[in-house]
Image (cartoon, rainbow, N blue to C red):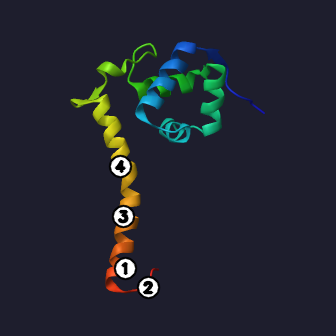
Amino acid sequence: MAGRPKRSVDPELAACLRRWRQDSGLTHSSVAEQLGVATSTLTRSLETDSFSADLRGRICGLLDAEGGSVGLAGLSVDGISAKDLRLLHKFVNLIPRAERILKEALVRRAGGVKS
């Protein structure tokens, strides 16, 4: 059995990822999915402030940072500010609920039975 890869402690990277996740309004599981790792792997890494070389590279890529640090004040994607990205994220999360409400309204209006 090969075991887990060697990890190195990096509290600064852990703090940056925590701050980015919270500022972005994302859950641990959604960040883990973006990183391509299990939620338990991300949780363990954040609890111990330690990361495998592979995970460190994925996090830095996600944060688009040099040396593992990120400043949200200057973060933008094609001119969209971090604040606007957070609002967009909240809006996107509302879409499934809005679709469900619209479907229910259309069924009621048609006098049909919900499927």
43 or 88, which lies in front? 88
Distance CA(mark 3)–CA(mark 4): 11 Å
Q: Position of residue 59 (x, y in %)?
A: 48, 26
Q: First in sequence, mark 1 or 4: give its number.
A: 4
Q: Mark 2 points at which residue?
A: 113
Q: In this image, 5 relative to 36: left or right?
A: right
Q: Position of residue 24 (x, y in %)?
A: 41, 33
| Residue situated furthest left in the rendering | 79
Q: First in sequence, mark 3 or 4: give its number.
A: 4
* Mark 2 nearby-residue class (10 Å; few <14, some 14–19, many ≥20): few
Q: Which amino acid does label 1 sit on?
A: Val
Distance CA(mark 2)–CA(mark 3): 17 Å
57 or 62, which lies in front? 62
Label 2 close to label 1 by CB (< 8 Å):
yes
* Mark 3 nearby-residue class (10 Å; few <14, some 14–19, many ≥20): few
Which residue occupies 55% across, 27% down? Answer: 55
Distance CA(mark 2)–CA(mark 1): 7 Å
Q: Name the residue under label 3.
A: 99
Distance CA(mark 1)–CA(mark 3): 12 Å
Q: What residue type is labelled 3?
A: Glu
Instruction: Single out the mark in the foreground, 1 or 4.
Output: 1
Q: Which amino acid does label 4 sit on?
A: Val
Q: Name the residue under label 1.
A: 107
Up/down of 4 relative to 114, above or below: above
Q: Mark 4 points at which residue?
A: 92
105 or 28, which lies in front? 105
Q: In this image, 97 relative to 29: left or right?
A: left
Label 2 close to label 4 by CB (< 8 Å):
no
Residue 25, image quadrant: top left
Q: In this image, 68 relative to 79: left or right?
A: right
Q: First in sequence, mark 2 or 3: give its number.
A: 3
